[in-house]
Image (spheres, rainbow, N blue to C red):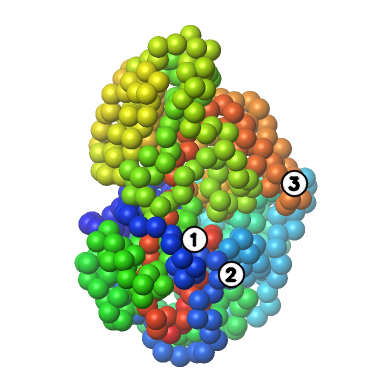
Amino acid sequence: MTGRFAACVAVLVLGLAGCGGGQGGGVRADTTFDQASTRTVHPSSSRGGTLRLLMTDAPVSLDPGDLGFAYGADLARLYARSLVTYAPAPGAAGLRLVPDLAEGLGMPSDGGRTWTYRLRPGLTYENGRAVRAQDVKYAVARSNYTAELNDGPHDLRDVLSGTYWGPYLDADLDHFTGVTTPDDRTVVFHLGHPFADFDHLVASPQTAPVPRDADARRKYEKHPLSTGPYRFSRNDIGEGFTLVRNPEWKNGPARPALPDRIEVTEKVAAADVDARLLGGGADADPTGAGVLPRTRASILASPAEHARADDPLTGLVRYAMLPRGVRPLDDVHCRRAVQYAVDRAAVRAAYGGPAAGDVATTALPPTVIGYRAANPYPHDLARARQELRACGRPDGFHTGLAVRSDRAGDVAAAGALSRALDAVGITVQVTRLSPFQWGSTAGSPAYVHAHQLGIVLDAQAATYPTGYGFLAPITGAVTRTANRDIMELRDPRLKRILTDGLKTTDPARRASAWAEADRQLMADAALVPLLDERTVTYRPGSLRNVYVHPAYGMYDLAALGR
């Protein structure tokens, strides 16, 4: 696996939801640049033609129940409908949930522990077979409760009540009590605790229905039964696939379905992808990984190409975590000293400058519900020294800084961090760790403590675009290996804020709870936000109806035409 797609996977195998190309120079110079991040470019309702997509590798899976990447969820909307989905719009409007398979959003009851969805009447698969509520239940069972399908998240399993071994070990679906189906059109989810963000979970392709007798386990990705506007006419895994119109499709609320045909070619060299995009021989890269650095430089230097380029926020935040179990970073004042000493502008330059992203000053990225702009720790060496005196280290201290050896941007950022901290007497020893052992090194509190790794560079994107969807994975329980809460928080106040937020049914109040959680996390100072990542992408002049969907951090594939 090589090139920009490998960089995308390196981030997303951690269970993240976004992707970006990351590093390179350039500026956000004029109003013609990055238009598709905020509006629809070349709006169109014209149907017909062939959309040509190129990618540098093959998808990990095309099975809607086994997708672990943001681009996979974006791509799946072409052939799979979930219970709800995100509105087809750029900007904040795209974070609004709308019904898809269901007639409406979920109806909560029992204090938010039960969620009921009613399917639209007349839904069918590509072969004319009726979609039933039991197919949705089976889809959730196979995607969340089987070892065979392990590339996607298990967010639904984590919140559903009861114990179930999965349909491949226990064929009696009556034993799966977390989901019930009173009739062919009603799906009821039973949760172990209130979860007001639940509509976001069922926006996952894992709720796209799968008839039990059509399930071919790992081989189902060869031809998933379509409920979307397109169906597979060809799928040569490792080479490419073709989607054509689904004759059973009845116009849905979120998919214009403009092209008659979509051709996807896999395993194309990254340089060839860029050349064909710029030369008009292709329409888009469906992974949203962005162009190569040398292509980016060429695009940003050319007024004509610059006007056809976008630099969207991917939703990925690059940050430093300060483990509380490593002295003297167990003292909040020492952690705040690090926060004030960090020169975030220098760190952004190390990552590649303005085209690589925006300086991050909050835990939450601007792409999630609950984000509020703030800057609690501006670069201030005098205040950093004041915090050092407060933690009894007036002359500074020494600690280790861990970085993944395969991330050139992180390695460069580690150098910028080291120089900034040295200005107040905090010296660091940079340790490059193999990505293949990351879970057992940086992800092991015992290893972190033994090697005095007081700073760990990492990255995170939301599993779904709310404050809870971003914070939950990195503020949960500390584990012995593959630990995501490298900060070792154990903060009862933060936990209470998040728990109370999940009980809050009013969306505005819930967003305020996520904002409060961000403020609490920043007050603790164990997370040092560095960069809200952007990635430069290119849209040929032939492409129509183009906008960046905020839920995926890339072009809305279901909207594109040509």
Q: Nearer the viewer, residue 490 or 228?
A: 490
Q: Tag 3: Cα neighbours inside 10 Å, few (<14), some, or many (≥20)?
A: few
- Relative vertical location of residue 233 with respect to residue 60 in this rendering, above or below: below
Under circle 3, the secondary element is helix
Q: Nearer the viewer, residue 428 or 315?
A: 428
Q: Any mark on residue 399, and which?
A: none
- Relative vertical location of residue 357 with respect to residue 266 in this rendering, above or below: above
Under circle 2, the secondary element is loop
Q: Position of residue 513 (x, y in %)?
A: 69, 41
| Observer able to see residue 391 | no
Count of number-bearing discs = 3
Q: CA distance from mark 3 to mark 2?
A: 24 Å
Q: Say what amino acid the circle numbered 1 marks.
A: Tyr
Task: Give me the residue at 50% from left, 81% from top.
Answer: 42
Q: CA distance from mark 1 to mark 2?
A: 12 Å
In-image side of 347 versus 157 (left or right): left
Q: Say what amino acid the circle numbered 3 marks.
A: Arg
> Which residue is denoted by mark 3 in the rendering?
509
